[in-house]
Image: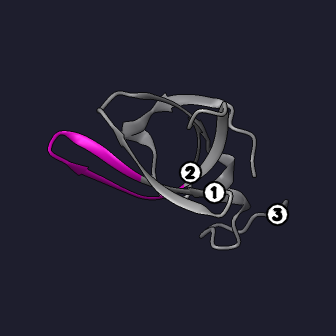
Amino acid sequence: MTEVTGNDRIDDVTPGDVIAVDRGAGEQPYKVVFKDFADGRYVVTLEGDGETFQLDAAPGTPVKRSLAAKWESAQSPTPNPHG
């Protein structure tokens, strides 16, 4: 998976992004599958390492995000000559 390098807010994360999440064993990269805003909080569905889980986060929560992940995907709407 792509190295997570950028710092951003959960508000700016979209499906296809890769963000770093610490689930007790240090930060690991996970792909954002879905994001919803309900009751003043974000519920983000993530996948990686053969598992899918949800993360609950308040608006403005800082995250480490990789924008490159979208451009490496075969589903990218823009042709990528490097991937």
Q: Residue furthest front?
A: 24
Q: Work out whether 3 lies above or below 34.
A: above
> Disc number at residue 48?
1
Q: CA distance from mark 1 to mark 2?
A: 12 Å
43 is higher (above) or lower (below) than 7: below
What element does badge 1 sit on? strand
The magenta segment is: 32-44
User: Measuring 42% from the left and 40% from the top, which residue is drawn there?
Assistant: 12
Residues under labels 3 and 2: Cα distance?
A: 16 Å
Q: Is residue 31 magenta?
A: no
Of the residues tagged 3 and 2, which is closer to the observer? 2
Q: Quadrant of residue 39?
A: top left
The residue pinned by badge 2 equals: 17
Please identify the quarter of the rendering in which residue 70 is found. Answer: bottom right
SS at mark 3 in the image:
loop
Label 1, residues with CA under 10 Å away: few <14, some 14-19, many ≥20: some
